[in-house]
Image (tube, rainbow, N blue to C red):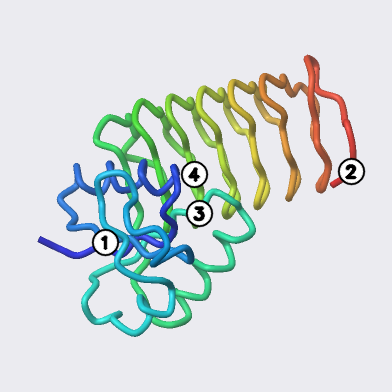
Amino acid sequence: MKNLAILGAGGHGKVAADIAEQLGWNIHFFDVAYPRINKCGLWDIVGDETSLIKHAAKYDAVFVAIGNNDIRSKKQKEFKALGFTITSLISPAATLSGHIEIGDGVLIVANACINIGTKISDGVIINTGANIDHDNQIGEFSHISPGVNLAGEVNIGQRCWVGIGSTIIHQITVGDNVMVGAGTVIINDVPAGVTVVGCPARIARKR
């Protein structure tokens, strides 16, 4: 059995570990809160980030399970630069076309559906029950929340957060660093660096 180090022992980490266990990984958690906290759900937290780097030879791969897009991006890139193998975790209960691209450090959760021609870049989270139609582009370290619906040919920028239950119609572009509020319906392109809410979406503020 291969050994997986998971960095980040919060709720997101538990979801990642549950999927990793289904995929046959032996799991150890590492978190900044160690040793004050030494359990993440059913799994042991065995050290902090420094400890993981020190014992790198024990692990076949690392998964960065940090929900914050900016921090996840920073840590995954740091570990990749150190020579760690960054694995993706894809739930056996997800439905994926055989004709998609998936980067490193991607998490795809149960009941997500991803159709042909879609590219999922490094560090992306596709959460529970999200529907990603054909020929989408999801930029690095973005988070597609539970129940999101993306129509065909949607382009999501880097480090975006698309809130739970949101809908984006076909051929829409969403710029980098966009926050999409829960239940938002996007029918026009969204510029970078803003928060959008409502049905139809409107810019609530610049980030």
CA gap, disc 4 and disc 3: 10 Å
Residue type at mark 3? Answer: Ile
Query: Along the horizontal axis of the image, is 31 left or right of 20?
Result: right
Residue 133 appears in the rendering = no
Circle nearer the N terminus (2, 1)? 1
Residue type at mark 2? Answer: Lys
Q: Position of residue 138 (x, y in %)?
A: 57, 44
Query: Along the horizontal axis of the image, is 9 left or right of 132?
Result: left
**Dot 4 lies on which element?**
strand
Q: Which residue is mark 4?
A: 125
Q: Quadrant of the N terminus?
A: bottom left
In this view of the protein, which residue sits in the foreground, 59 or 91?
A: 59
Circle nearer the N terminus (4, 3)? 3
Would you say the residues marked 2 and 1 are in contact, meaning their CB atoms lie under 8 Å apart?
Answer: no
- Label 2: how many Cα within 10 Å (few below 14, some 14–19, many 20+): few
Circle nearer the N terminus (3, 2)? 3
Image disc number at residue 206? 2
Q: Residue at x 23, y 70 (%)?
A: 60
Circle nearer the N terminus (1, 4)? 1
Q: Position of residue 40 (x, y in %)?
A: 34, 50
In this view of the protein, which residue sits in the foreground, 155 or 204?
A: 204
Query: Along the horizontal axis of the image, is 176 left or right of 80?
Result: right
Q: Residue at x 36, y 41 (%)?
A: 15
* Relative height, residue 52 to residue 158 (above, below): below
Q: Which residue is mark 1?
A: 28
* Relative height, residue 32 to residue 112 (above, below): below
**Dot 1 lies on which element?**
strand
Which of labels 3 and 2 is toward the front?
A: 3
Q: Position of residue 172 (x, y in %)?
A: 71, 31
Which of labels 1 and 4 is toward the front?
A: 1
Residue type at mark 4? Answer: Ile
Q: Which residue is mark 3?
A: 66
